Amino acid sequence: MYRKEKRIPTIIAILFLLLGIGGVVYLEKSPTSLISRATPAQQPADVHFTNITDNSFTISWLTTEPTVGAVVATGNSEKFTYLDDLDSDNIQRPRKTHFITVKNLKENTSYTIKIITGGNRCIIDKFCPTYAQKTASAHDTRIDFPPAHGTITTSQDKPADGAIVYLVAPKSLPLSGLVDSSGLWVIPFNNLRSQDLSKVPELSESDVVQITTVLSLTENTTALIDIKSIKQNLTIPTMMIGKSYNFIDLESKKNIIAPTVTPNILGTISVKLDILFPKKDGDTTPDGNPRLRGLGKPGSQLLITVNSSPQTAKVTIAKDGTWVWRPPKRLDPGIHHISISGYDEKGNLVTIKRRFIVLKSGESVLGESTPSGTLTPTTTTSPSPTLALSSPTPSLTVSPTLIPSPTTIVTLPTSEPPRSGSNKPTLILLGAGLAILAAGIKFLIFH
């Protein structure tokens, strides 16, 4: 006589298997921290909300030492985490300037924004302040004049890579942009909104715009320029960190701006065929239609080719020895190659190739810029980037409301998290489910 063994019914085995599969799905889709490397927490300073539209806005701040940063946006029953715009590969890198675009938002909706510095947990509230910001209403009105654009260098005359440029027009909320690895910056006006977010403000040619660039808490430069000069698509002359400039009525000051190229002894312009952007392999741009630019023999033609998304064009070099071309077809994020073929100053056919990267998070358009002289700059004695103007007075202010909150530990959620972490719990649940299912099948066979 055999002793009857107790068996687990098949239905229970299937139930456990379903629970195991559900656990697998949960663990695979559960949020993991976007913070890829821990750095000491830093208190955010000089916090600004800019580029406020009906579906996005930008939050920027500075830290005294390089640290990683992120923001958590909560609103409309949703919660997302955003990294620095330059961390488009989801790998965080410590830096002193932080520039994050919060997008895919709902119009005319309030959002709570929490800054996270130095890691994925906030134990001290001052390192993770909370703000409230509202998006604007949708508008069909658009400003049709060109973007403001130029070049920023450090006090050592090197590109001010990673610096933040703020632009404040009268009766308007501030706009902002980043300086790229070549020192170029561009700020379009299509995101301009009135201070109450209700409309697109009207600007006259005589209106004065304040431009402030910050590289750190103690390194900045300021400039003034009129809307008329911007509407004429004039390239703002190179500005150096630590100085202030007056570019009002820039057209009348052209005679004191150093030319891009200078005549040689024989009276002809001598220009070496070259690419100024991308200046070196690996240069990055946040725009899919970047302004590729360089130098060459005046009046000659260049054959320009961009690979990855093949586009070809013939460009005639201007009289001043410069050329600029912008691909009409938008380039996908990733690595691209530019090749130019033309004649140098000696009449030899030359081909130059460079590799550049289009970032995923880019929304602005890179503009051309030519080396130029400064317009009687003065040394900035105060580290404050605020520059007083006559009425109306643009000012760089924080428009959102700071929300006091108790000291809590906050773990970052994720919007597009990388797959990482241990898979042991997944394997245990899956193995347990399969074992129980096998037991149920054996029960059916022998009974």
Image (tube, helix red, strand yellow):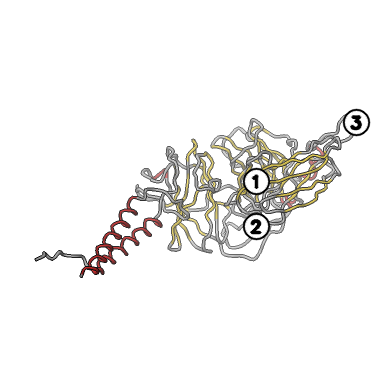
Q: Which quadrant of the figure has residue 21? A: bottom left
Q: Earlier in the sequence, mark 1 or mark 2?
A: 2
Q: In the shown orientation, is residue 32 left or right of residue 373? A: left
Q: Secondary structure at mark 2?
A: loop
Q: Secondary structure at mark 1?
A: strand
- Please provide percent x and percent y for residue 134: 51, 59
Q: CA distance from mark 3 to mark 2?
A: 46 Å
Kindly report which numbered mark, 3 or 2, lies closer to the viewer in this rendering. Answer: 3
Taking the view exactly as shown, the residue that stands out farthest to the left is 1
Q: Is residue 379 above or below residue 387?
A: above
Residue on which the image places disc 3: 266
Q: Residues within 10 Å of mark 1 (few under 14, many from 20)?
A: many
- Please provide percent x and percent y for residue 199: 61, 62
Q: Earlier in the sequence, mark 3 or mark 2?
A: 2
Disc assigned to residue 190: 2
**Cβ atoms at labels 1 and 2 below 8 Å apart:** no
Residue in the foreground of this view, choosing between 206 and 9 = 9
